Image (cartoon, rainbow, N blue to C red):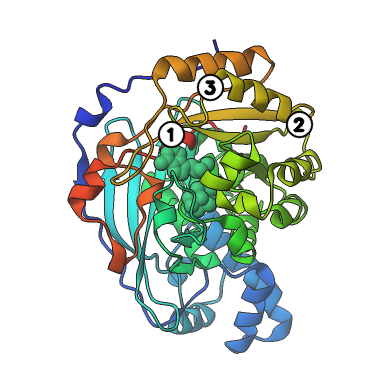
C-alpha cells in the first residue's frame, strides 16, 4: 500500500489564524534583490563604485543579502561607512508589501504579496504557501500572474496571463518566507552564521504556484540560480522542483541551465484526453513529452522525474488508465504523485472516489513506482495555488471559501 493516510473530513472545520503583517513601504530606490552577481557588480559601478572594487563589494553584499538576510545597509559591518551611506541613498532591500499572512492549524502558512506595476498596468497580487512536514518544509512559488494555458481542471487556467513575475518577485517569495519563519541568521560578520539544512524551515521549493514556469524561463532560471547559490540562500538543486505542463523545448534547457528536479503535469495517458484537459498537448503530444523526460539531463534513479496526475472521477481514474500509465513510463526513472482533484466554483469535474484513488495507487505501486497520494494541506486557510488573482480579477471572499486547496501536490518533493 503506497498511499499515506489522509483525513478529508475534518480539515475544513479548522479555524484559521489570520494576521495582517507589517508592510514594508516600497521605495523608489532600486531593489538589489534578483540581480545576478555580474549585474550586481555592474550596478555598483553605475552608482560610482570603482570598477576594481565592484566585484569584491558585490560579493560582500551578496552574503549580507542572501546569506544573512539583512535589509539594512548600515549593519553591513565589513563595508566602509561612506559606502554604506551611498548604498542606502541609491538602493534598497525592501521586501514587498505583504497584505496578509495566514497560519493553518496544520502549520501551513500562506502569504499574499502585492508587487508594484512593471511599466504600465496595475499592481499584482501573488500567493505563496509554505507546507511543513515531518522531514521537510516546502515552499510553493508562483512564476506568473495568471497563465496563458487553459488546463480544464485548473482554476488558474480560467485567468488570462496578467504578466510574468520578475526574478526579483520570484525570489522575494522565498526571502519573505525565510524572514517570517526565522530562517535567516541575521548575524553580524562574526562567524558564518550558517543555518544547516536540517535546522531550516524552508528546505525545499517547488515551482507549482500560479503560471507555467517554462513560459517565463529567463526569470525563473535567474531566481533559481540565485536560490541555489552556495554563498547565499544555498538551497540544494535536488530540493528545487520545477513543474511544467509540458513545454517540451524548455525541458532540456531546465536540466542543462538550471539543473533542478523536474515534475511533469501528465494527467492523462492518451493524446485524445490530454488534448482536452491539458491543451498544450496539441502542440507537444505525449510521445514528445516523454522523450524529453527520457533524456532529461541528470535523470537517474536517484534523481527521478515526478509525474503529477490529478484524479478526476470517471475521466482518467480507471485501472485501464493506471495500466497505460505504467506502460508509458517504462524506462523513465519516475515517481507518480496522485493528486485528489480540488474543485473550484464552476469546475466541471469531481474528485475520484477515495477507494478508486487507492486502487489506482496500489496498481501503480505494485508495478514498481512510488505513487503517494497527496494529502490536501492548509484547507482551513484555503492555501490554494490555483486561485491567485490580480487586483482586478480577485475572487470574492465567498468564492475563495468554496475553493479547496490545490496544494495537495506540493508536499513531498525533492530529497
Ligand atoms: N503550470 C505548471 C505549474 C503549476 S500547477 C504545471 O501545470 O505543471 C501545479 C500542479 O497543480 C499541476 O500539476 C497542476 O496540473 C495541478 N492542478 C491544477 N489545478 C488543480 C486542481 N484543481 N486540483 C488538483 N491539482 C491541480
Ligand atoms: Fe497553467 Fe499549470 Fe494551471 Fe495548466 S495547470 S492552466 S499550465 S497553471
Residue 94: in sight, yes or no?
yes
Q: Nearer the viewer, residue 259 or 217?
A: 217
Q: Residue 214's x, y, as percent?
A: 62, 57
**Vertical comparison of 389 with 200: above or below:** below
On residue 408, which mark appears?
1
For marks 2 and 3, give the one nearer the viewer.
3
Query: Do the residues bearing badges 3 and 1 touch, measured as CB atoms within 8 Å?
Result: no
Residue sitting at the far front: 272
SS class, disc 1:
helix
**Residue 92 figure quarter:** bottom left
Q: Secondary structure at mark 2?
A: loop
> Quick one: label 3, few (<14), some, or many (20+) residues within 10 Å?
some
Decide: marks 2, 3 in contact (CB < 8 A)? no
Residue contact between numbered discs 1 and 2, judged by CB atoms under 8 Å: no
Quadrant in the picture for the C terminus: top right
Assess disc 2: are there few (<14), some (14-19) or many (≥20) residues with their C-alpha within 10 Å of its C-alpha: some
Find disc 2 in the rendering and name its residue: 332
Q: Nearer the viewer, mark 3 or mark 1?
A: 3
Q: CA distance from mark 1 to mark 2?
A: 24 Å
Q: Nearer the viewer, residue 209 or 156?
A: 156
Q: Is residue 323 left or right of residue 341?
A: right
Q: For mark 3, what is the residue?
A: 318
Residue 208: which disc? none
- Marks 2 and 3 sit apart, C-alpha to C-alpha, by 22 Å
Amino acid at each position: 500500500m503506497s498511499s499515506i493516510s489522509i483525513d478529508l473530513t475534518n480539515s475544513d472545520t479548522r479555524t484559521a489564524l489570520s494576521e495582517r503583517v507589517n508592510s514594508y513601504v516600497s521605495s523608489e530606490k532600486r531593489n538589489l534583490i534578483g540581480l545576478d552577481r555580474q549585474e550586481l557588480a555592474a550596478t555598483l559601478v553605475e552608482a560610482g563604485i570603482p570598477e576594481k572594487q565592484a566585484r569584491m563589494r558585490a560579493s560582500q553584499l551578496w552574503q549580507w543579502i542572501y546569506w544573512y538576510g539583512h535589509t539594512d545597509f548600515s549593519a553591513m559591518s565589513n563595508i566602509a561607512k561612506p559606502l554604506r551611506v551611498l548604498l542606502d541613498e541609491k538602493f534598497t532591500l525592501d521586501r514587498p508589501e505583504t497584505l496578509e499572512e495566514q497560519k493553518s492549524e496544520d502549520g501551513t502558512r500562506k502569504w499574499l504579496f502585492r508587487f508594484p506595476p512593471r511599466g504600465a498596468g496595475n499592481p499584482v497580487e501573488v500567493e505563496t504557501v509554505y507546507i511543513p512536514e515531518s522531514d521537510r518544509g516546502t515552499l510553493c512559488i508562483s512564476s506568473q500572474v495568471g497563465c496563458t494555458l487553459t488546463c480544464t481542471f485548473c482554476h488558474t487556467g480560467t485567468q488570462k496571463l496578467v504578466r510574468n513575475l520578475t526574478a526579483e518577485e520570484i525570489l522575494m517569495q522565498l526571502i519573505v518566507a525565510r524572514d517570517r519563519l526565522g530562517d535567516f541568521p541575521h548575524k553580524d560578520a562574526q562567524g558564518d552564521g550558517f543555518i544547516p539544512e536540517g535546522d531550516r524551515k524552508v528546505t525545499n521549493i517547488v515551482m507549482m504556484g500560479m503560471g507555467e514556469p517554462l513560459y517565463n524561463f529567463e526569470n525563473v532560471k535567474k531566481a533559481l540560480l540565485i536560490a541555489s547559490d552556495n554563498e547565499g540562500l544555498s538551497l540544494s538543486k535536488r530540493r528545487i522542483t520545477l513543474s511544467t505542463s509540458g513545454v517540451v523545448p524548455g525541458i532540456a534547457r531546465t536540466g542543462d541551465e538550471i539543473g533542478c528536479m523536474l515534475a511533469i503535469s501528465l494527467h492523462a495517458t492518451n493524446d485524445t484526453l490530454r488534448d482536452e484537459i491539458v491543451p498544450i498537448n496539441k502542440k507537444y503530444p505525449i510521445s514528445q513529452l516523454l522523450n524529453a523526460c527520457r533524456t532529461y539531463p541528470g535523470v537517474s534513479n536517484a534523481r527521478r522525474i515526478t509525474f503529477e496526475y490529478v484524479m478526476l472521477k470517471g475521466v482518467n481514474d480507471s485501472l485501464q488508465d493506471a495500466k497505460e500509465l505504467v506502460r508509458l513510463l517504462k524506462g523513465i526513472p519516475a515517481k507518480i504523485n496522485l493528486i485528489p482533484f480540488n474543485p473550484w466554483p464552476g469546475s466541471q469535474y469531481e474528485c475520484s472516489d477515495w477507494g478508486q484513488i487507492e486502487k489506482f495507487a496500489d496498481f501503480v505501486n505494485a508495478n514498481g513506482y512510488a505513487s503517494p497520494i497527496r494529502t490536501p494541506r492548509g484547507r482551513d486557510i484555503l492555501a490554494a495555488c490555483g486561485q491567485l488573482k490580480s487586483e482586478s480579477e480577485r475572487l470574492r471572499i465567498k468564492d475563495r471559501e468554496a475553493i479547496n486547496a490545490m496544494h495537495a501536490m506540493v508536499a513531498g518533493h525533492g530529497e
